[in-house]
Image: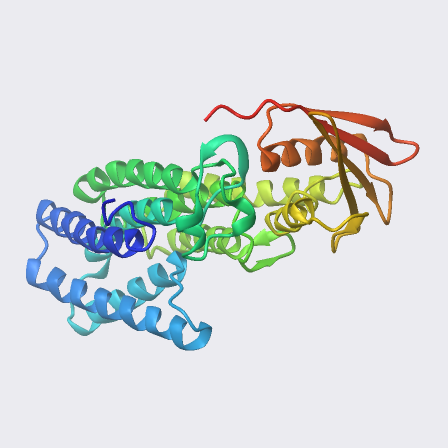
Amino acid sequence: MSRFSDPATAFRAWGCAALGAALAVGFATAALTGLELRTMAAIAAAAVATFVLLAAGSAVTGGSVRLVYYHHELGILAVTWALLLLARRPPLPYLDATVLGLGGFLVLGRMGCLMAGCCHGRPAARGVRYGPAHVAQGFPPHLAGVPLLPVQALEAAGVTAIIAAGVPLAVRQEPGTALAWYVTAYGVLRFCLELLRGDAERPSWLGFSQAQWCSVLLVAGIVAAGWAGLVPAAPWSLAAGGGLVGAMLLLAAARSSPGSAHRLCSARHTAEVAGLLATTAPGMHMSTLGLRISTGAEGDVEHVTLSAAGPPLTPGQARRLARLISVLRGVRTATVVGGARAGIYHVLLAPRPFDS
């Protein structure tokens, strides 16, 4: 097994390759735009030092190294800006090259996430599966063998496209245009991909993840900077900012409706459901959200009974939970039997497994 595919070494191996990609993209952009390469070398050294310090800080406070892309992006851009002001160099051209280099790092960094099993997607009918070797490295046991959306690969592909469009902007447009483009485009991409993420232990507020709030605030910051003349103003930044705010309002409204299955199918509750399905103790078990689950079997057909301690489950919630359970159980079809009046539903799981 290659060190790039071994769960024990993949993240570090891809991380080293990501550093090379960041330097390649950053220096190539600098060369194409006629920037001083020795200044870019100083920026690269400062960026690496900032990255190491932030990673070490996360290890001190959290007990292990935890890399959060937005934290590192903001830290490196702030240090780069300060360095350029001290060196009396125009910040925007170098920030264009720096942020595109950060994108290069992210592309291969997310491939490391894909191989290691971190930052994974939600359970789906088809997707990438992780096994015992990943569990030994900290992957959630309840998702071992479950197909998950390859959200890491989707992010890598999206950022590659953003860089491909950003380099010509850095070469042909006003300084700062590529910076505004990258922050705006990545903000929209990340906000959307967060809806597909399945790793449970991530901070959130009012139903939106920390990364989604960062995306909205950073895009809003680019819009404000354009109005203030700090970066070139662009209509697509304003459109993206308005679109993200509108999306948040629509999602919040949909999730607050009585029949919403958002919380029941969230990443954290999915982990609970998987744990309750795996328990061997007899009887009915209840999640922290009041979902009651009991399991049984008749011949080749497994049945899962669902009900709620609070307001009765709606048919829509029962169907969403049935699809989730079928994926967690590794079967293709799930039939929901029951009535909305009683609020009790029986999910019948067919014995046919998913295609490998």
Q: Is residue 317 left or right of residue 112?
A: right
Q: Nearer the viewer, residue 297 or 236?
A: 297
Where is residue 137 drawn, in percent x and y?
40, 57
Furthest residue toward bottom: 60
Image: 46 above or below 246: below
Q: Position of residue 96 (x, y in %)?
A: 24, 51
Tell me: residue 21, above or below residue 168.
Answer: below
**Quadrant occupied by the C terminus:** top left
In the rendered image, residue 36, in percent from the top left (x then y), is placed at 7, 58
Q: Residue at x 27, y 46 (%)?
A: 108
355 on left or right of 183 = right
Answer left or right for 189 relative to 109: right
User: Horizontally, is 155 left or right of 262 in the view?
Assistant: left
Q: Is residue 300 above or below residue 148?
A: above
Q: Residue at x 59, y 52 (%)?
A: 208
Which of the 4 quarters of the picture holds residue 173? top left
> Is residue 177 at all visible to an observer of this figure?
no
Residue at (53, 26) in percent of width and height:
354
